[in-house]
Image (cartoon, rainbow, N blue to C red):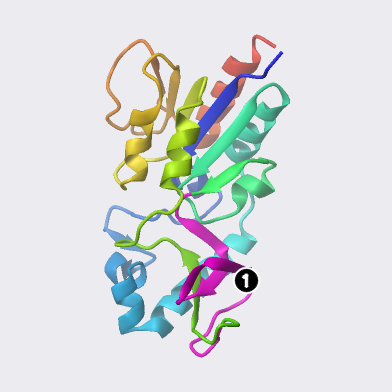
Amino acid sequence: MNKKHIVVLTGAGISAESGIKTFRDSDGLWNGHNIEDVATPRGFHKNPALVLDFYNQRRKEIAKAQPNAAHKGLAALETHYKVSIVTQNIDDLHERGGSTHVLHLHGEIFKMRSVNDKHTVYDIFDDIAVGDTAPDGFQLRPHIVWFEEEVPLIEAAAALMQTADIFVLVGTSLQVYPAAGLINVVAHDVPKYIIDKNIPPVGNNKYIIPLQKNATEGVAELVTLLLAGH
């Protein structure tokens, strides 16, 4: 029998409980920096050293962080379901938590690329400095999708949404586009579990199942519900 396909969209809320500061806190800053200064091509062009250092620090933080019960709970669903995770997060906590199919919409902190070639990607586990060049001779940058840049994997993510038998949203406020629009691609009659302390505006019908909890508690409840029939 074919396993049902769970498609999960995750945001900063799932990694917050691992101690990773959320992308947009209430003050509108990211680790004390204006988003425009550290997460746009303009910011990188203006002050590459600042941007590289910012992501070097994020890389160190994420390397020290550990996957939490929410990451592990989603991975545990693979015992009885096909599970695809689309994450807006640049950390690798889903993979370290045991998930085997993860699509990173906004890039990955442990990868880098040339400013001149967005397709050739290299692993990076320490720092990138101004003057560090790729084999093509151009400056290296984090393999991160910044604001004002296109999201190359959005079509692949949308295609996954269309194959969902069950949809799960965890820890995202649905404010960052185009990712926020992905839920609209999921078929109307597919059950949609929404896990967040503050349920985002997703409408109200019989297919929406809100679990108004933080990620670890909400995923624990989700796992109980979805594994009950197995």
* Crowd around label 1: few <14 · some 14–19 · many ≥20 (10 Å): some
The N terminus - image quarter: top right
Location of the C terminus (image quadrant): top right
Q: Residue furthest bottom?
A: 131
- Is 185 above or below relative to 192? below
Left or right of 166? Residue 199 is left
Residue drawn 43% across the image and 54% down it: 152
Looking at the picture, does residue 26 appear above or below residue 144? above
Q: In percent of the image, x 62 and y 38: which residue is there?
A: 69
At 64% from the left edge and 52% from the top edge, which residue is drawn? 66
Q: Which residues are magenta?
A: 105-133
- Res 214 visible: no
Which residue in the protein does label 1 denote? 124
Q: How many numbered discs?
A: 1
User: What amino acid type should be assigned to the residue bearing mark 1?
Assistant: Ile
Q: Where in the figure is residue 63, as x and y percent of width and height? A: 63, 63
Whether residue 29 sits left or right of residue 222 in the image: it is left
Query: Which of the two residues, 64 or 77, is positioned nearer the viewer here?
Result: 77
Residue 29 is a magenta residue: no
The answer to which quarter of the image holds residue 110 is bottom right
Closest to the observer: 112 or 129?
Answer: 112
Locate residue 180, reporting x and y percent. 33, 40
**What secondary structure is found at the residue carrying circle 1?**
loop
Q: Position of residue 174 (x, y in %)?
A: 33, 40
Residue 120 on the magenta span: yes
Instruction: Let me know if residue 29 appears in the view.
Output: yes
Q: Is residue 170 left or right of residue 121?
A: left
Look at 53% across and 72% down and name the residue there: 113
Give x and y (percent) for residue 127.
58, 78
